Amino acid sequence: MNFHFAAQLANLKPSAIREILKSAGDPNLISLAAGNPAPEAFPSEILGKIAAEVFASDPTSVLQYSVTEGYAPLRKKISDLLRCRWQIQSRAEEVLVTSGAQQAIELTARALCNPGDVILCEDPSFIGSLNAFRSHGMRLIGVPMEEDGISLAALEEILKREKSVKLFYTIPNFQNPTGRTTSLAKRKKLLELAMAYDFIILEDDPYGELRFAGEKLPPIKSFDPSGYVVYCGSFSKTVAPGLRLGFAIAHKELLARMTVAKQGEDVHTALLSQVMLDRFLQQVDYDSHIHRLQEIYRAKADVMLFGIRKEFSSRIRYTVPEGGLFIWATLPDEVDMPTFCKKAAENLVAVVPGKAFCVDEQGLSHAFRMNFSTPTNEQIEKAVQILGRLTKEVCGA
Amino acid sequence: MNFHFAAQLANLKPSAIREILKSAGDPNLISLAAGNPAPEAFPSEILGKIAAEVFASDPTSVLQYSVTEGYAPLRKKISDLLRCRWQIQSRAEEVLVTSGAQQAIELTARALCNPGDVILCEDPSFIGSLNAFRSHGMRLIGVPMEEDGISLAALEEILKREKSVKLFYTIPNFQNPTGRTTSLAKRKKLLELAMAYDFIILEDDPYGELRFAGEKLPPIKSFDPSGYVVYCGSFSKTVAPGLRLGFAIAHKELLARMTVAKQGEDVHTALLSQVMLDRFLQQVDYDSHIHRLQEIYRAKADVMLFGIRKEFSSRIRYTVPEGGLFIWATLPDEVDMPTFCKKAAENLVAVVPGKAFCVDEQGLSHAFRMNFSTPTNEQIEKAVQILGRLTKEVCGA
C-alpha cells in the first residue's frame, strides 16, 4: 500500500513528549516529562457523587445529542466565573465549550488563518499548539522570550516586516515550557500592538488558577474592548483532564466560525463531562477548591526548587515559577543538551529536551523542562538528586 | 471589529439541520428533522451502574490524561467486535478511538487530502461530513445515487476525468439521508475501482447495527486486503451519542497520521466515556442489546411507513429502508420543495429540505428527509397525517 498523505501532515511528528511518555516502560523510570496535573488534586469523590446524581435524576439529558456551542447552563457558569475571578466581561453567548483547551486553540487558528498565514509564537512554546498550527499549514514565527514575556522589540520588528500575521499565540501565566509570566506592562503593550497592526491575540491560560506565589495579573482579555483577544481556558488543571473540557471566549462573529469548524470535528463536547462540570461548579466552594490546588502545587514546586538549589551545579540557570507545573533549566552553552537528556534517561529520569518546544524545528536549545506536578515528593527528590549529579559531571559544581 | 476569516470557513453555513433544531422553539412543533437515536434505546440504567463502579474503584484512571490512540482495552474490544460481527480482520493497533464518528471522518480526510483535492460523495449525502470536508477546502464531486447505491457508470466517468481523487465517501447501510443500502455487487466493484484508480474508500457505517429488515451485507472493509478502506463506526446509535464515541479502522501508516491530527484537535477522547463504554461492552450481552434496538427501530419505521401508505398522495415516492433512522420522500417535479417544507413547518411539522444534503450547494432537490427515531409513535402518526394532507393539497390524491 502506497499512501499519498496530505502535505501538511506528512512530515509532522507526533508530540515528542507524548512519545516519551508512551515509551516510558521501565517502572523504575521517574518521569518529569509529563504535564499531567497532580492526581491528588482531582476532586474524585464529589465527581463520583455527581455522576451518580446525574444518572439517577435525568440520564437521557446527558446521553442524547446536544448543541455544538455547549451545554447552556455551563456556558453561563463559565461566563460568570470569568467575570468574577478574572474581570473578563463576556456573555454566555461568547463562550464556546470545547473538548479541552487544545480544541479551543486549534479552532481559533482555523477560523482565522489560511494555510501559509503567519502565527507568531513565544519561542519556546507549547508543542501541542505549535503542532496543531503546523498541521494546518500555518507558518510559525518565533518571538524570543525574556524573563517577563516576549521581547517587544523583536515582536515589533517582525510586525513591520511580515504582512500576513493573523495571530499572536501567548501563554501569559507560568508559560509552558518556561514557567515564565508576562508582566502587566507587556500584556497592555501586546494589546496595543494587536490594535495597531490588526492581528488577534490568542491568550491561552490553562494554568492561571494555579498561582502559588507573586501577585495575580489581569488577563489581556480583561482590557480588550472590542474582540482583539480570544481567551482560551481549561478545566484540565482545575478539575480533571480526562473529562476533556476547555472553552474559548471570543467575539460572537468569530465564535460562529469556530462553532461551524467544531461541528465538523466532533459535533459537540461529551455531554456527561459538561453536565458533571456544571454541577461541580454549582456545588463546590470554588475559591476553597482552587486554594487547595494552589497549596498542592506550591508544596511540590518547593520540593523541586529546594532540591535544585541543593543538588544542581551552580552553572545551571533555572526559572522560579510563580505557578503552573514546570521549571525550565538551562545548561551552559558548551554542554550538549540532547546528550544530557539521553544520559538522564539512562539514569532513569525523563525530562523533555528544550528543542521539542522550539518554534523553528531546526532551532537550537540548551534547556530542558522539568514537571513537578505528576511525580510524588519522593520521586522529585530522587530525580533532582540524579539530575544534580549529572549537571556536576558535565559542568562542575 | 473587522475580522479577516480563513477563506475555507468564511462562507460555510452551520448545518441547516442543527439550525432548524435550535430554532424549533414552538413546543407544539413535531420534529422529524433530527437524527437523534430513540431515547428509549439508551441503556441508561447499566451506564449509571457503570459510572458508579468506575468512581468507586479507580477514579484517577478516568480523570487523568491518556494516550491519543484511545483506551487500550477499548481498542481491543472494538477490534474483537468488528471481527466477530462484521468479519473485519483488524488488530487493536489499527483502531483509533475518536470523539464520535464525525471526528473519524474528518481525520481521514485531513490525513489524505490537500486543500483542492477531490472527495467523491454519494449525492445526496450526510451534511456533517460534507461540511467537514468543505471546511478544509477539499473539492467535493457528487456521484448520483440509485436505489442500490451510487451509479457506477457515473463514478467511472468521473474517475477517468479527475486526476486528484483521493477519497470516495460512502454510507453503505441505510444511507443518510436516503435510507438506501448499497448492494453487495456494488460494494465489491467499489473496492475494485479503488484499487484500479488508487483512491481510498471512506466507509461510514453509523447505522449498520440498526438493520431491521433484509439481509445483513458485509462491509467493504471486510474484503479489503491491504488498506484501501477506512472503516468508521459510531457508538452514538448503539449506546448513546452524548458520550461522543466513534472509531476508525485504518492501515497503521494512515492511522499514525490521523493520530497526529487528533492530538492537535483534542489530545484524546473523553476518558470517562471510553472507560464506561469498555465496561459496557464487557458486561452486556451485545447480541441481545442490539436485537432490542432493532425491535425499537423496526416498530417506529413501521408506524411511519404505515402512515405514509395511508395518508400520502400516491404521487410521492419514498424509500422503504431496511434499517437506520430515515425515510426519504420525493415530490413530483412540478412541486416546489422548499415551499412545501416551509408549509410543513407552518403546520408544525419540521422535515429537512433535500437541498441541505446536495453535494453541489446550488443543487436542486425535490426530496425531503423524515426521521422516525426521535419522535414518539403518536408524534409520528400525527406528523404523517399533517404531511399527508399537504402532499394531497399540492399534488392530488
Image (cartoon, coloured by chain):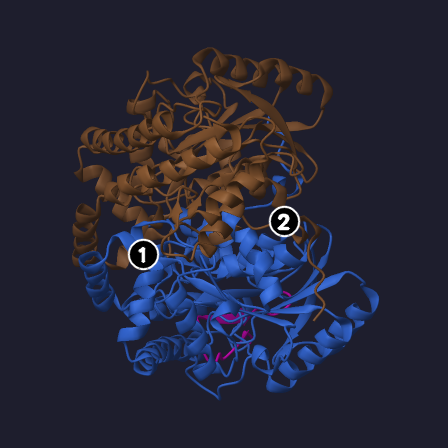
Chain colours: A brown, B blue
Seen in the picture, residue A27 relative to A97 is either above or below; the reply is: below
Let me know if residue A262 appears in the view.
no
Query: What's the mark number on residue A12?
Result: 2
Identify the secondary structure beneath mark 2: loop
**Is residue B327 highlighted in magenta?**
yes
| Location of residue B334 with respect to B24 vertically, above or below | below
Residue B228, quarter of the rendered image: bottom right
Horizontal arrangement in the rendering, residue A52 relative to residue B127 (left or right):
left
**Crowdedness near tag 1: few (<14), some (14–19) or many (≥20) residues, C-alpha within 10 Å:** many
Q: Quadrant of the N terminus of chain B?
A: top right
Instruction: Read off the magenta span.
Output: B315-334
Q: Quadrant of residue A240?
A: top left
Q: Amino acid at mark 2?
A: Leu
Residue at 33% in and 52% down: A271
* Measured Cα–Cα span from mark 1 to mark 2: 29 Å
Mark 2 crowdedness (10 Å alpha carbons): few <14, some 14-19, many ≥20: some
Please say if B139 is above or below B228: above
Query: A140 left or right of B176?
Result: right
Q: Amino acid at mark 1?
A: Leu
On residue B272, the disc is 1
Q: Is residue B279 magenta?
A: no
Residue drawn where x is 62% and y is 54% of the image: B110
Q: Nearer the viewer, residue B97 or A229?
A: B97
Residue depicted at x 31% and y 59%: A63
Q: Chain of mark 2?
A: A
Q: Position of residue A388 (x, y in %)?
A: 41, 33
Q: Position of residue A203 (x, y in %)?
A: 47, 28
Question: Please, which chain is the residue tagged with disc 1 on?
Answer: B
Whether residue B177 appears in this view of the structure is yes
**Majority secondary structure of the magenta segment?**
loop
Give the numbered dot on residue A79. Answer: none
